Structures are given as C-alpha cells and as structure tokens.
Amino acid sequence: MYRDQDLDARARRRRATGGSRVGLVEIVRRANAPMPAEHSVTFRVATAVAVLTGILACAAVGEVSVIGAVLASAGSLCGMAFSYKTRTTPWQWVKILLAVAVLAIFASFVLQMISAAHVGQLTSIEVPLTGLFVWVQVIHSFDVPARRDLLFSLAAAGALLTLGAAQAVSVGFLAYVAVWLGACLFALGCSWRSMTGGVGPLALGSLAATGFVIVLAGAGFLVVLPAPRAAQAITLPSSLISYLPLRDPNGVTGTGAESTEPAQAGKASGRTGIGGYLGFASELDIATRNTLGDEVLMRVRADRPGYFLGMTYDTWDGQNWGRSPATGRILQLTTGSPFEVGSAWSSFPELQEGGGMIPGLSDGELALGPLNVQTFYVAQPIANLLFATPDPTEVYFPEHSLVLGADGSMRATIAMTPGTVYTVISSDDELAPAALARIKTSQPGLVSAALRQDLELPPGRYGRVAALARQIVTAARATTTYAKVTALEAWMGAHLRYSTDIPPLLAGQDAVNQFLFGSRVGYCEQISTALAVMLRTLGVPTREAIGYVPGPFDPLSDLYEIQAKDAHAWVEVWFPGVGWQSFDPTAQVSLEPPDPGAVLLSDIGHAIGALPWAPIGGGLCAVATGVLVAAGVRRRRRRPAGWVEKVTAELERRGAAAGLKRLPTETLGEYASRLGNLGSWRAGPAATASLPAATAVLERAAYGFHVPDAPTRAFVEEVVNGLHPARGSRRPPRGRRLTPA
Amino acid sequence: MQERSRRHVPAADRARAPAVRRQRVRHLALPEHALGPVAGSLLLLLVWAGVAHASGSGWVQTVGAVVAGLLLLGLVAPAFAAPGLTLICERSPTDAVAGSPVEIDVVGNRPMRCTPWSVGGGPLLLTGKVPASLFIVPPRRGVISTVTVRVATAAPLGLLWWSRDQVLELARPLYVAPQPRERGGELRQMLTPEEGQGPPRPTLTGDLRGIRPYQHGDGRRRVHWHASAHTGDLMIRESESRQDDPIRIVVDLPRDLDAADRIAEEAMGEVVVQLNAGRRIVLETTEVTGRVVTPVVDRLSAGRRLARSVSPPGAR
C-alpha cells in the first residue's frame, strides 16, 4: 500500500509542456492560439456595458464628441453582436478588414498628432489619443469570440475610463466609475463561472459583497497613496472651449447680460454679480451685498491652496474702494502661452520690493519656497481675471495676449466661459512671521511716490480711528509693521463680530467709523477695510484685495471647489524690501494642503458621528441580548448527540419539511435516494447531487467506525443545509442550522 | 495438488521491507504561477500611478485605487476561498492497472479545479456540487485508499489560482495491479487472445484425457470397458500426466520500489503468459499478513495478489 509518489513539480511542469523547453516563439504561438468560444451572453453584455461606460465617460469630459460617442457606442454594440454570432466560426476576411481599419486609424492619429501637437504641450494629443483608443476598441469589438478577448475589452474599457478621468473635474464622474466597476465585477464573475463550466446561477450576493470589499480596499488605497499634485504633471493644462473677444480688451468684465460686457460698479439692485458678489469691477461698494450662492464657479488643483487674488483697490472714499490712475495702468503681453509674467511685473515700480538688502534678514529667510502650481477649471462665467496666489511668474493660457495690471491683476482679453482651463505658477513670496517681525516700518515721509496713494485717506474723517489705532499699537508695544498688524488683528478679533447681516449705511455716513464705533458687526469687506484704514492712519501702506479662498476639497478629484460664497476680501500690507504681504483679519484659512485621505476619513468620521447613536445602540443591545438568550436556550436544549445523529436528524427534518418523512424501516441511503427523486428542491437537481456522497459518509461514520475529517464533515453539513424546499412547498423552520461539530 | 514445477522470479535487488515514500501534503493555500499576474498587476498599477501623477488628476488616482482594490481582491481572495474547498469521492473502482487511467466519481462543494497529485492524471474543473469523473493514473502497483488531490480556486474573479492539497479518501480500496511484462519479450500477442481461440481448460493429474486402442503392455486396470464394448476392441484409457500440474510462481520482492515493481511486472507477465497457455498457476507472495500460497485462476486475482504483495521480512 502506498499513498504518494515522487512526482515533483518540475517533472509535472516538464510533462505539461511536452517534456521539452518552451521557446519564445512557442510561447507567442500558444498565446495567440485560438481559444474556445465564449458562449455566455451575460458576460458579453457586461463587457459591452463596461466599454460603453468608458466611451461615454470620455464624451462627458469632452474628449470625444457627442456624435463620435454615439457612433462608437453603436459600433461597439454591433461589433459585440457580430462577435457573438460568429464566435464559433470567425470570418477570416473580417479579421483582415479589421487589421486594415486599425492601421488606417493609427495613421489618422499620427497625422492629427503631427498637425495639432505643439512642442512641449502633450495636452494637444489627448483628444486624438482618446479617439484612437475609442475606435480601436470599436474595431476590436468585432473580433471578441473568446473569453480572453472579452477580458481584453474589459481592460480597454478601464483605459478609456482613465482617459476620461484625466480630464474629469466633477464629482459626477463617480457615476461612470461606479457603473464601470459594477460591469467589470459582473463580467469577471461571469468569466469565473465560464471557467468552471458555466452552469448554475451567478452568485449575485457574493459579487455584491466582493464589490463592497473592493470599494473599501480602493478607499484604503486612496487614503494611503500620496495625492497627485499639479506640479508633478508632465504638461500644465490650458484650454478653451469658446473664444469670445471682449468689447474692452484692457478692462474688467462683470457678469451682465453678456460675459463680454465691461464690469460696472456693483450695486445692490440692478445686477447680481458673479454668484451674487458685486466685486471685480472698477469700484467696490462695501455697503452693499447680495446673498452669495453656493454654485461652483471654478475648480482648482493647487500644490498649496491660498488666497487666489483677483484684483486690488487703493483709493478709499469712506464707502467705496476704487483704483487710482496709477494702478489702472496696464501692460499687455503678446508672447503667447506660456506668459512669463514674473519679469513683466518690473514694469510697475509700485509693485517692486524696493531693492537692496533688508536689514536684519538673512539670505536664507528670503529664499523662496517651491513654486506653487495651480490649475483652474472654470465652471461658470466669471470675470476675465486670472486668479492666482501671490507673485505669479508664469501663466499657461491658450491665448495670444494677456493683460497685466499695476494692481497685480492678470486679465484675459477674452471672456472666461465654462470649460476654460488655465494654469498659473506662483512663487508665493510670503515671508514667515518671524522674518516679517524684524522689518521696521518705513517713515511716512520716506515712502516712495508710487506708494503714496496707498496711504491716502479722506481728510478729516479718521481722527478717532487713528487714535484707536495708536492706542492699540501702543498698548501692544508694537514698533514694527508686523507687530502693528497683528496687534490690530488681535483687537479686531476680540471686539468685532462677523455677520453678513449688516445694518444699512446711511447717506453720508462713513463705513469704517460706523463699523468700528457703531455696529461692530460686518463681514470680510468691513473688517479688511477697517484694518486697512487703521494701518494707513499709522503710516503703513495698505490696499484692499479681493479674490477667492479655496472652497471645499474633493478628495476624489483632488480639486478645491470654489463656490460663489468663497469670494473674499483681505488686506495687503507693504513691507519695505519685501513687497506686498497678505493679511486676513476676518478668518483663519488653512494654508496647508489637506491630505485627501485625512479629508475622506474626516468626512466618514463626521458621517458616523452624525448617526443617531442612541436608537442604534439600543437596537444593537436588544439584538445582542436576543442572540445571547437564543444561544442559552439552544445550549439547554442540546442533547448529547453525536455528529452523525445531529446531521441525520437535520436531514430527516428537512426531508419532512419538504413533505417526505423517513420510514421506520428505511435506511439512510434509501431515504436519501427518495429525497433525491423528490424533485421539489429550490436549487433543482443540484441540491441533491451530492446527497448520495454525503449519505455514504454518514453511513460509514455510523456503522463503519470511520471518523470523517473536518472538511468532509463540513461538506456533509453544507449538503444537508443546502436542502431547501422549492417555493410553494413547505419550508424548514428557521433558526435551526447545523453547527460545526 | 502436486507440485510439478517451480518457477522462481529472481529478485535482483533484495531489500528489507517496503518503504512507503510519503509526499508532504500541503494544506496551506498558495498561489499558482503568481509571478505573471502579480507582476502584471504591479506594473499596471505603477503605470496607473505614473499617469495619475503625470496628469495631476485626482480622478485618475481614484480610478487607479479602485482598480488596485479590484486586482488586490482578485489576487488574494482565492486564498480565503481555497481552505473551504472540499472534494469527496462518491464512487471508485476496485481494480486498476499501473499506468492505466482509472475513473473515479468526485463531487465538490463549490467550483474548483482538482488535479491528482500523488498519482498521475489530468486536471478536472468542477462546477459546484455536480458530480464529475476524475481520471487518475496510478504509476505503481499497490493498494490505494487515499489520493492526494490538489484543489484550486480562483474565485470570485478568476484572476489567480490558489491551491492546496486535500487527501481524498476513495470509496473503496483500489488494487493496482502491475503492468504485465515479459523479460525481453513481447506480451502483446499473449495478452489479447481472440475469443474462441483460447487454450483448453486446464486439468488435473489423473483426469481423463482420452482413449486409444490397446497396445501390448498396457495394464488391465487401464482398459476402458465401456468404450471397448462400444467399439468391439479393447480400448485403453489415457490420463493427464504430471506435465499439466500447476506452475508455482514465487515472487520475492526487494525493498527497493523500482526493483520490486519490475519484478512484480515480470511476475504478472509470467502469470498472463501461463494463463493464456491454459496452465494452472499457484502464486506464492508475501503480504502484510504473511506468506500466501494460493492458486490464481485469472488476471484479476493475480493482479490483486501482486498489488498486495510486499517484500518479505529480511529482504534487502
């Protein structure tokens, strides 16, 4: 008697390969050998759904035209049907035609690439590349007779989805990912069933559980993996959907009836502004405010989110911020994208840092950090301002000209319509507080002429404000500009309240006086204006800056969604030798890029925390108590029966439930045979297919002194527990299942 | 029974006792040919991560994370499904010949692929609990009660197979007879005698073979009176001689398995030759219970005897 033989794995492998080494040619030949035809219709349908999802995803982000998507979808479906029809006898001449078609499409792609691609701009080949993928997939769908070909189509559908994802900026893309994942899971489940014979129903419950685990694992990967950053991109995106020249190419557009109209000073009535915001015009009336909406104006992918500056104001008349003729000066760049704006700012002396070394600062403290790359995806018509963090150095905008303003703004000469994409690289010359704290305030008389406007105030209005400012900085013993700013911010934080519901400003009333000595309630514009005015009374040049702060972060798309309500105003303070530095007395906005995983976990935590835990806890306690009580009752009822007796009793019980009781004179084998012939089982003949084997094990265990091992016991129990009477017949009572011995 | 001849099968390499070489049964589920799928998946995810970071797109990263989850589950989930695989033998034959396929009926609890591992045989794909026929090829003679089968699954996505060994208990012991072999000769002709052309049934010494006319010197006791009365002449009865006595084949197996198999095959070949020649055979073997000397009347019984035979105590 023997049990085993000395057939090692290597000999088996050699035997499997015919006893000889397999060369590369042979491997290739085997890989290309015809595979058995795949007969599963559901497998093909699921694969077709995955492919269609990929095509539609590309169409949704504009990489494939609508007509192209419709044609490709129809062609893919026809190809799948054709492949199914000819799966057993593929037509060879069709293969030749498909090969010719693939070559033609590839040649077309090369021609498009040569004609459309620009040096250094890979984005220009994305659309032809997507078209190549789509049409190759359509052609391939005409020749997918076997399982391997269908799996290749699934992978190709994933590639199409990825091409779409590269341009996706909306959370709506999640629907395509979900549909694609579901179709892939279903197709792979069908593939596995086909691999093992292709009979029986598909275990949808198991597939659903698998999908749930996959989503969990994917979320885990998303949490763990470092997020892609805009600066890591090979190519910096910039594109236009439409081209609408402005009526005044050098001005700022508002949101009137047409996006090409020049901007007008915001008023509470008449127009609504961009998302309700009345800024981004020649004047900013801080006494009026519309309700800001939450519609998404732009989506931004930025290495370091910060204050996205739109424009600044330097003149203040007590209610309105305006722009002096000096800051109204412009410089038009016509070099084409990318625009080297870093060197162009030198044309505006008021924007220069003053030159020379800064006393008390080392070279290391003045060293700039890594560049901040920001890509803006315009979702709603906005002003023709190119928003960016401070000190932009390079702008990727697909237009031949760009206007730079002396106020630090960048303006397009065309309307910023939805679909416009541009990228700005900024140096973010913001010094650390410790460095700023060592810079002394310039004497008012020594301020350059270009900055005089940034110190002017309406005469005779702000004596009380100046006294208050002096009192605050004196109390704080602030001698430097930074110390003065922080002292004033601290005072404002302690004495002012934030609210968008502000009292109306009476005619002739000064907004700052009314705010500081009256209501002391306001929002960013009142707060920042008050700080700017107080600093001007102390001889510190300031100006009002408006723009946007980063909105909610979407960890799936790695984008900040700038909503209309994210419009913001803050103060820029002049530091000698450094330049303009931003201060936000209104609110603290995180300047650190949030980690997508942390945001996701935080959202999940908030969602879990928002659950009604009291009733859930009560329900869980009740269920646990019930389970414990039931377990106790079962333990008391359990009689000291062996495994064979228990399984036999369970078999008899299920047979009786199906309407077939065991006769007293009947052996277990005879009874199992009658059960097998009963035919009223929910799972059909498969339910009793293994019953003879299980019964044989029981009989051997009962009468043959044979002790089955654990897997065999589990198998027998699984067979017995799988006996469910068909619908309409009697069912076994619930709550009693075999427990492992 | 009169012993007339004794043909001894020489044991070229005598050994002590039969050694059963046990192959380790791997209960731990391990992946099969994992290099390709794992390397391919890693390469795919690397490319995906590269595209995600080169494009700076969070959605590519999200899709890549989902694909990574799908691949991870597809590659690892069978490891959790493999321990739950159970295979049971429903029916198996009693007799087989070494090197020839044997069909056994098996049934599994879920879709799987099973491959005979301790014996030869090809893989079989099982669909759920539907019984199927598994062909095993016992390479050696002997008595098999269990077969190690490598069960594998790639559930639920079919991306990577994970396998483990399961000791499959046969429904009944399988007697594997040695393949008959004649030393230096061909047995093909003797192994397949055509029907109706076989040799006469063997007789015992003293059995009546026929009658002949009386010759001078024949004994009176050998006169067949009935035939003489019938023919009118004296007829003499002829009996079987000692040349038709059973052949005694002694099989002493050495301990070495290969040598023992070779001797058993030659013994089986001799048995087949003699059976086809119509001779009676007494087979002398050593079994676990001791020395067994009994006649064999057909190939089946001879095969079972040789399947059970072991090397005698003290054999080298």
Image (cartoon, grey):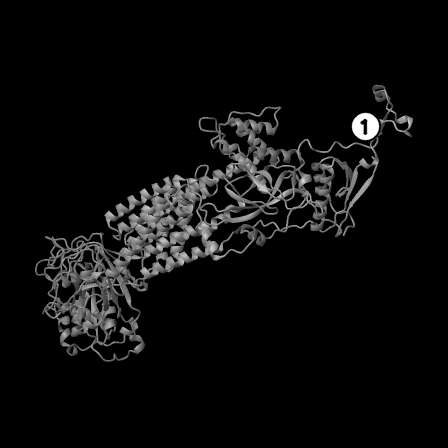
Q: Please, is residue A371 above or below residue B308 in the view?
A: below
Q: Secondary structure at mark 1?
A: strand
Decide which of B17, A91 is in the foreground and name it: A91
Occupied quadrant, residue A85: top left
Decide which of A149, A344 is in the foreground and name it: A149
Q: Is residue A33 visible from the viewing direction of this image?
A: yes
Q: What residue did someone put label 1 on?
A: B210
Q: Amino acid at mark 1?
A: Gly
Q: Please, is residue A6 above or below residue B54 in the view?
A: above
Decide which of B312, A469 is in the foreground and name it: B312
Instruction: Where is residue A641? Give x, y as percent.
Output: 61, 34
Please give left or right for residue A290 compared with residue B112 in the image: left
Q: Please, is residue A102 above or below residue A619 in the view?
A: below
Instruction: Where is residue A663? Give x, y as percent.
Output: 59, 24
Instruction: Where is residue B238? Give x, y as percent.
Output: 84, 29
Please give left or right for residue A528 compared with residue A459 in the image: right
Q: Is residue A615 visible from the viewing direction of this image?
A: no
Chain letter behind tag 1 = B
Instruction: Where is residue B302? Give x, y as percent.
Output: 72, 39
